[in-house]
Image (cartoon, rainbow, N blue to C red):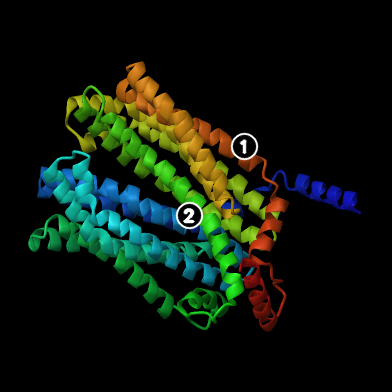
C-alpha cells in the first residue's frame, strides 16, 4: 500500500516536473500582480530616503554627516530588527490564508504587533543614549550631537513601524498589494512638502526631518486603515471579512495554549530577524573597513554610492521574494504542493532575468550613474571600477533574495539565517579583509569580498531550494495552520478555523 502510494507520488512529481506554457504564464501574472506594487513601493521608499539625504545636505555638511551617522545607526539597531522580526509572520499568514483560516492570520498579526512594540523598548533606550555611546567610541562631538538629536526625534517612528510592518505583511499574505502601493505613494507625495515645512520653513532642521519621517509612516498607516474600513462592500464579503477580522479583538484564548503559539511565532521571527540583520550589517561592516583604507574619504564616498546602487537594485529581488513567499505559503496552506513548486520555478526564472538586467545596468550605465552622485574625479574613477563588480554581485543577489522568500513562505527562515551567516561572515568577510589589506586591492578588494559572499550564498540557497520535498512542506503547513475543505459550508468552516487555531497554540 505504501509502495503504491509512493509510486503514485513519484509519478505525480514527474508529471509536474516540466510545467506547461499556460501554467507558467498564469503564475507569472499572479506573481506580477503581487510583486509589481511591492517593487513600486520599494522605488517610492528609495525616493523618500533620497529626499532625506538631499534635505540634510541643504541644511549643511555637519547636518549631512550627523544625519548619515544617525540613519546608519537607526537602520542597524532599529529598523533592521523590526523588519526582520515582522517577517516571522509571513509563513503563518500566507499559509493560513491558503488554508482559509483567517483567524490564525488574525491572531498572528496581533501577536507580531505586540512583539514589535516590546522590541521597541530596548531600541528606544539605545537611541536615547546614542550620544554618550558615540563619545565613548571617540566620535566627533558635533556630528554625534546632531545624530543624537535625529535619533531622539525618530523614536515615535518605532511605534509606526511596529504597526505598519505587520499590517503590510498581513495584507500581502492575502495578495492585497495594490492598496499598499497607493497608500504608500500618497504618504510619500505628502512627505516632501511636510519635510520642507518642518525643516526649513519652521527652521526645525534635523529634528524636523526626523519628525517628517514618522509622520509619513503614520500617514501610510492611517490611509491603510481608512482603506480597510471604507472599501468593504457586499461583494467579496468573505474576503473582506478576513481583512477586517484583526481590527476586532478575538475571544480570549485558552491560557494553556498561548505559550506554544508564541513559541511558534518566535521560532520563525528570531531566525528571520537574524537573516535580515546579517545581510544589512554586512554593508555597514564594509563601510567601517573603508574608513581604514589609504584614502578613506574617497573609499567612503564610493561606499556611499555603492550602498545607494545596491539599495535601488534590491527593489526587484525584494518584490520577487515577497511575491513568491506569498504564493508558496498560500499554495502550501491550500494543500497544493505542485503549485508551490511551480511558483518557485517561475520566481527563480524571473530572478535570473532580473539579475541580468541589473548587471547590464550597473556595467553599461556606470559612468552616468556615478555622475549623479559626484563630480570628484577620484571618486568617479573608483566608482566606475567597482560598479561592474556590484553588477556581478547582482547575478547572485537577485536569485538569492528571491530564494529567501521561498524559504520564508515554506516556514524555513532558520536555513536562510545559517546560509547568510557563513556566506557573508565566514566566506565574504575574510576574503574582503585579505584582498583589501593583505593584497592591497583596497576598496576593490572589499567589493570582491561581497562578490565571494554572494556566490557562496546563491549556490547554497539554490541547492536547498532544489532539494525541497514539496509534499513534505505541504504536510508541515497542514500541521502549522490547519487545512479546511473549500467545499464546507460557512458554519462548518468557522468550526474548522477554531480547531486549526488550536494547532498553532
**Which residue is label 1 attached to?**
463
| For residue 280, side relative to residue 232 (left or right) | left
Q: Residue furthest top?
A: 439
Q: Give residue 35's mark.
A: 2
Among numbered discs 1 and 2, the one appearing first in the sequence:
2
What distance separates the C-alpha of mark 1 from that of mark 2? 24 Å
Answer with left or right where residue 323 lies relative to residue 294. Answer: right
Mark 1 crowdedness (10 Å alpha carbons): few <14, some 14-19, many ≥20: few
Q: Mark 1 and 2 residues: CB-CB less than 8 Å, in contact?
A: no
- Where the C terminus falls, by quadrant? bottom right
Q: Nearer the viewer, mark 1 or mark 2?
A: 1
Q: Is residue 43 left or right of residue 10?
A: left
Say which of 286 and 468 sits in front.
286
Above or below, 480 against 358 in this view is: below
Q: Residue at x 35, y 61 (%)?
A: 120
Query: How far from the left and from the top, in percent, is residue 353?
Result: 50, 39
Quick check: 273 left or right of 7? left
> In the image, what residue occupies the spot 19% across and 50% down?
131
x and y, in percent, of residue 284 in the image: 33, 39
Residue 217 picture location, percent across and down? 31, 64
Q: Quadrant of residue 102?
A: bottom right
Instruction: Give me the residue at 48% from left, 68% from top.
Output: 111
Query: Counting other residues with Cα less than 10 Å from the Cα at mark 2, is it few (<14), some (14-19), or many (20 or more)?
Result: many
Kind of element beneath mark 1:
helix
**Residue 403 visible from this viewpoint:** no
Q: Quadrant of the N terminus?
A: bottom right
Amino acid at each position: 500500500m505504501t509502495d503504491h502510494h509512493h509510486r503514485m507520488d513519484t509519478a505525480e512529481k514527474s508529471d509536474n516536473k516540466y510545467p506547461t506554457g499556460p501554467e507558467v504564464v498564469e503564475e507569472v501574472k499572479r506573481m506580477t500582480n503581487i510583486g509589481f506594487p511591492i517593487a513600486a513601493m520599494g522605488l517610492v521608499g528609495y525616493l523618500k530616503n533620497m529626499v532625506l539625504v538631499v534635505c540634510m545636505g541643504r541644511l549643511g555638511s555637519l547636518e549631512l554627516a550627523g544625519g548619515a551617522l544617525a540613519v546608519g545607526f537607526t537602520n542597524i539597531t532599529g529598523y533592521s530588527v523590526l523588519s526582520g522580526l515582522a517577517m516571522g509572520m509571513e509563513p503563518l499568514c500566507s499559509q493560513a490564508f491558503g488554508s482559509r483560516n483567517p483567524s490564525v492570520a488574525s491572531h498572528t498579526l496581533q501577536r507580531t504587533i505586540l512583539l514589535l512594540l516590546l522590541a521597541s523598548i530596548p531600541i528606544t533606550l539605545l537611541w536615547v543614549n546614542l550620544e554618550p555611546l558615540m563619545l565613548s567610541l571617540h566620535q566627533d562631538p558635533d556630528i554625534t550631537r546632531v545624530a543624537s538629536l535625529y535619533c531622539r526625534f525618530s523614536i515615535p517612528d518605532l511605534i509606526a513601524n511596529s504597526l505598519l510592518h505587520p499590517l503590510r505583511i498581513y495584507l500581502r499574505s492575502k495578495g492585497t498589494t495594490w492598496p499598499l502601493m497607493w497608500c504608500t505613494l500618497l504618504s510619500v507625495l505628502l512627505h516632501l512638502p511636510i519635510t520642507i515645512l518642518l525643516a526649513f520653513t519652521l527652521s526645525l532642521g534635523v529634528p524636523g526631518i526626523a519628525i517628517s519621517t514618522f509622520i509619513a509612516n503614520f500617514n501610510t498607516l492611517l490611509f491603510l486603515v481608512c482603506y480597510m474600513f471604507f472599501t468593504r462592500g457586499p461583494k467579496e464579503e468573505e474576503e473582506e471579512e478576513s481583512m477586517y477580522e484583526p481590527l476586532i479583538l478575538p475571544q480570549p484564548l485558552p491560557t494553556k495554549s498561548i505559550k506554544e503559539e508564541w513559541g511558534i511565532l518566535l521560532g520563525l521571527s528570531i531566525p528571520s530577524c537574524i537573516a535580515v540583520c546579517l545581510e544589512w550589517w554586512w554593508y555597514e561592516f564594509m563601510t567601517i573597513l573603508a574608513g581604514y583604507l589609504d584614502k578613506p574619504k574617497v573609499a567612503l564616498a564610493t561606499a556611499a554610492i555603492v550602498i545607494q546602487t545596491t539599495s535601488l537594485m534590491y527593489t526587484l529581488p525584494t518584490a520577487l521574494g515577497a511575491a513568491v513567499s506569498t504564493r508558496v505559503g498560500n499554495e502550501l496552506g491550500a494543500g497544493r504542493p505542485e503549485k508551490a513548486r511551480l511558483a518557485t520555478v517561475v520566481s527563480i526564472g524571473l530572478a535570473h532575468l532580473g539579475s541580468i538586467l541589473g548587471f547590464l545596468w550597473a556595467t553599461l550605465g556606470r559612468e552616468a550613474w556615478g555622475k549623479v552622485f559626484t563630480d570628484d574625479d577620484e571618486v568617479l574613477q573608483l566608482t566606475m571600477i567597482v560598479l561592474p563588480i556590484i553588477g556581478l554581485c547582482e547575478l547572485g543577489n537577485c536569485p538569492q533574495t528571491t530564494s529567501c522568500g521561498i524559504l520564508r513562505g515554506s516556514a524555513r527562515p532558520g536555513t536562510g539565517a545559517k546560509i547568510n551567516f557563513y556566506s557573508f561572515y565566514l566566506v565574504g568577510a575574510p576574503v574582503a579583509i585579505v584582498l583589501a589589506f593583505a593584497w592591497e586591492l583596497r576598496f576593490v578588494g572589499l567589493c570582491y569580498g561581497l562578490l565571494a559572499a554572494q556566490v557562496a550564498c546563491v549556490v547554497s540557497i539554490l541547492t536547498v531550494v532544489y532539494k525541497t520535498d514539496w509534499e513534505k512542506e505541504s504536510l508541515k503547513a497542514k500541521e502549522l495552520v490547519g487545512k479546511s475543505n473549500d467545499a464546507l459550508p460557512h458554519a462548518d468552516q468557522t468550526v474548522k478555523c477554531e480547531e486549526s487555531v488550536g494547532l498553532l497554540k
